[in-house]
Amino acid sequence: MGRFTITEIRLYRVSVPLKNHFSTHLQTVTDRESILVEMVDSDGEIGLGECVAFSSPWYTEETVQTCWDALVNWLIPVLVDKEFIHPSALNDEFSHIKGNRMAKACLDQAAWDLFARKKGLPLWKLLGGIRHEIDAGVVLTGGIDDWMVSAVQEARDAGYKRVKLKIDENTNPMELKKLVESSDDLLFFGDANGIFDKLGLEALIKFDRAGLALIEQPFGEDEWEMHTEAVQRMVTPISLDESVRSVRDAKRMETSGAGSVIVLKPGRIGGTTEALKVIQIAKENDLAIWIGGMIEFGISKAHNLALASLPQFSLPGDFSASDHFWHEDPVEPPVVIENGVIHLSERPGIGVILDKGLVEKYLIDSYR
């Protein structure tokens, strides 16, 4: 039970407007373009995946278009009509195709969903998850002003356990400290997205007194030495996000001492199969780990929630309700927050299905 033969892979390229613009010093996102995947087996069972690349290469080298090209021309053709006994075996078929981790990830995830559905198990249970309630965490962007104070209060009222704030060149560490101290019942993360490449290490050290639980990605993705120096000079834990693009990067983080906390983004590193390897590295080296978001829809979020049920995760991830980013999320049921947690589904697989009406509404291209 669980063995599957892939007979068809369908792609739906959609573009959905965000409720509010999502701005960092890198980019402002107003519409989220993505690729939704249906992997169909010989019994007609369907597994779902989602490509989390962005429309332009502001965050990673891969984009929606490069992923579409890789999927259609290289990745899908090597999978159709093949039989698999386990989803991790897809990696063997991809071994001759370099890179393209985000394109590979959506197929890997679809295979895991399909496999779990074939076994009649929720994916989180199949993976060995131990918790069926996942702490919710929200990401807020903007300056530290009256609006931000209200947004933090709204997050608290909604039950969120953790708030992540974006740090840019205008963020005042003392104002941030006041905000953190006024909300001592919340856990605060600061996400720099590499801004201290521009501002410098001494500017970063000023944030060591802000009371943050961690600072995420102070420097650029390849600035390993700068991150190592920051770890040596600061009390606040350094968490690496963009630097962890692969299993190899996770190993390098541990050996270099460039951080003590991993931000795991399965959709960026190759999918669930690769994510499980990174989780094992964290376990073996006593590294904290949590799951970061990619302004994703409910498919990617459902896959990430399944992984977050594993015992290695000790910090709240980027898990907000569907209505935080979207008026309409093209999956059902939506993600909802109840008393600060998300309850995992007992349905087989990731527990969600595509809302075909909404997919059609926001569709800009398809492949089958």
Image (cartoon, rainbow, N blue to C red):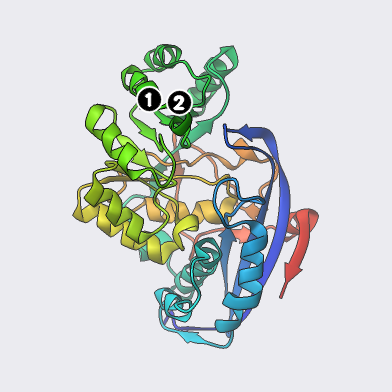
Q: Residue 265: horizontal and vertical position, in percent?
A: 45, 51
Residue at mark 2 to residue at mark 1: CA–CA distance: 8 Å
Amino acid at circle 1: Leu
Residue at 27 percent of width and 41 percent of height: 260
Q: Which mark is residue 17?
A: none
Picture quarter containing residue 360?
bottom right
Mark 2, Cα crowd under 10 Å, few <14 / some 14-19 / many 20+, is: some
Residue 345 shows up from this direction: no
Q: Quadrant of residue 30?
A: top right
From what the image shows, is residue 122 above or below residue 164?
below
Do tag 2 and tag 1 residues touch (Cβ < 8 Å)? yes
> Which quadrant holds the N terminus?
bottom left
Residue 5 picture location, percent across and down: 53, 85
Q: Which residue is label 1 attached to?
A: 204
Percent coordinates x, y for residue 147 in the rendering:
60, 16
**What is the secondary structure assignment of the residue under circle 2?**
helix
In depth, the one of 360 and 65 nearer the eye is: 65
Tell me: residue 362, above or below residue 276: above
Q: Earlier in the sequence, mark 2 or mark 1?
A: 2
Residue drawn at the location 33% of the way across and 29% of the way down: 213
| Viewport quadrant of the C terminus | bottom right
* CA neighbours of label 1 inside 10 A, class few (<14), some (14 to 19), many (20+): some
Residue at the spot of label 2: 199
Q: Nearer the viewer, residue 324 or 44?
A: 324
Which residue occupies 37% across, 14% down?
A: 181
Relative to the observer, which residue lies in front, 76 or 238?
A: 238
Q: Which of pointers 2 and 1 indicates the residue nearer the eye? A: 2
Amino acid found under the numbered disc labelled 2 = Leu
Q: Is residue 327 left or right of residue 130?
A: right
